[in-house]
Image (spheres, rainbow, N blue to C red):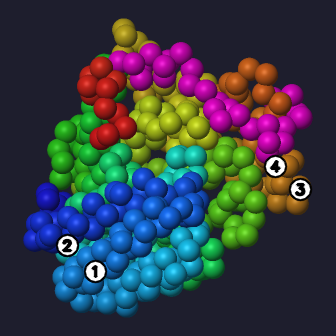
Amino acid sequence: MVSPRGTSVSPLVKEACDPAWIQLKDDIHRLRIIQTADGGINADNNRTVAAHRMVWQIVEAVMSMARYFPYDGEYLEAVVDDVRNWARAGFDIPDFSNSLRAFGPNDGRKDGRTHLVLLPAYARNSGGNCKFEAMLVGEAWPEWLDDLERTRFRADSYRPLMLADFTAGYDARPGAFFPDTVSAPQRVVDGSDSSLSLFACEAARFRAVCSAVVASLQMELPRELAMALHERRSSQQAFLLLGLLRDRSRHTDAFSPSTIPGEVPGPFWMQALEALRVDVAVYLEATDLQDAEHPIGSMVPGVLLLDRMLRAPLFGRRVRNVDSLAGQLLFGFLQHHRVLRWHGGRLRIDDNVTDMMVRLAMEIDGLNKYGDHRPKSTLWAAAHRLISRYVPPRGGSAWDHGMGSLASVAPDEFPLDAFFERLSSRVSELTAGSLSAV
């Protein structure tokens, strides 16, 4: 495993080759096949017998692997208990609240420390299916990042991890693991509100997709951004810092109802606006590092722009795709204000992009203040109108006519326009049609 300079993450070769891990992955794979959408297993004699056998083997495998992770003893014991209790309860909806409370990566940060993770989780942008997952991960916490976090960008919940081996749900290399997606009906509040950044996956996806985008649009890039686009170490360092800044901003001035425990999450565009609010705040903070000529911070503004507005809209299913819509809105806003320009068949980003990001932050903040003392449905409708100024909604949308409800939200309420459709086709050719497998 290649690590950014200053990290010492173990490649986990020994653990990944252990027969117990290979058996665990196989059992998880077979268990996923018979799980229902809520993570349970329908009552059936054959399935129940098979499930009990798999659970016994999973427990044996976890107990065998525990010797590699002595500092995670409490967590792995909780995993074993939760798996057994799930079987004893008749394979109903899994409840891994106890495991989540003892979740190892949330206990401090240590460069090079490794973990085994096994939890039933709802995959993002998957239609809500809950499946068991297992991962081998290594922590990355280099000295330069520790110094920035201690002295300037405090983010106690940020946990960057490198994904070494995994089960089928992580074949698409997601950029983060969210503990709040774990199947835990007895929802844990403390310790489960952070995202675990799989920054190396994000960096690899950025390099693969954005290099094809840049080639297709004939973009000229500054030296720092070109380094991040073409060098593995530089891109991983950029995403390590980007993750730190995002985590810090995510816990500041959040306005989406989806960020408030116990609240109805609302239509998916509220989450998209929250994701964009975070990224705009990160961009503006990163420009300060850029102005100070911080070697890694100088890469972040450009990396964020490319990844959010030109990679995210091309990635994932067109079903309430939060990340895509945030990217579409950023692109549409900058295009509307003539920050993005075509010249001689090339896409150019004007130098006044930072001024426009300040203006976008003000628009989102204005929506925040507008919704402070109004019903949620009024805020949702106002947010739909704001997005519609820059990203046309689907034709015939009830929300476009002021008659929207949660039931009338289309799976792809804001479809890709002709530009992104053409770009997606070109980039798919350049990446051998494997965008979702990066």
Query: How many numbered marks appear?
Result: 4
In space, the residues marked 4 and 3 are separated at their CA atoms by 7 Å
Q: Which mark is residue 60?
A: 1
| Contact check, label 4 and label 3, Cβ < 8 Å | yes
Residue 231 found in image quarter: top left
Give the magenta part as a residue range: 400-426
Q: Residue 384: in sight, yes or no?
A: yes
Q: Residues within 10 Å of mark 1 (few under 14, many from 20)?
A: some
Name the element at disc 2.
Answer: helix
| Residue 223 picture location, percent across and down | 22, 38
Viewer-nearest residue: 232 or 343: 232
| Contact check, label 1 and label 2, Cβ < 8 Å | yes
Q: Amino acid at mark 4?
A: Leu
Q: Earlier in the sequence, mark 2 or mark 3?
A: 2
| Residue 426 picture location, percent across and down | 35, 18
In space, the residues marked 2 and 3 are separated at their CA atoms by 55 Å
Q: Residues within 10 Å of mark 2 (few under 14, many from 20)?
A: some
Say which residue appears at 63% left-offset and 51% top-offset.
271
Q: Amino acid at mark 3?
A: Arg
Q: Amino acid at mark 2?
A: Ala
In space, the residues marked 2 and 4 are separated at their CA atoms by 51 Å
Q: Which quarter of the rendered picture does the C terminus lie within?
A: top left
Left or right of residue 356, residue 427 in this image: left
- Residue at which label 2 appears: 20
| Residue 104 picture location, percent across and down | 37, 81
In space, the residues marked 1 and 4 are separated at their CA atoms by 51 Å
Q: Amino acid at mark 1?
A: Glu
Closer to the eye: label 1 or 4: 1
- Residue at which label 4 appears: 379
- Residue at which label 3 appears: 374
Name the element at disc 1.
Answer: helix
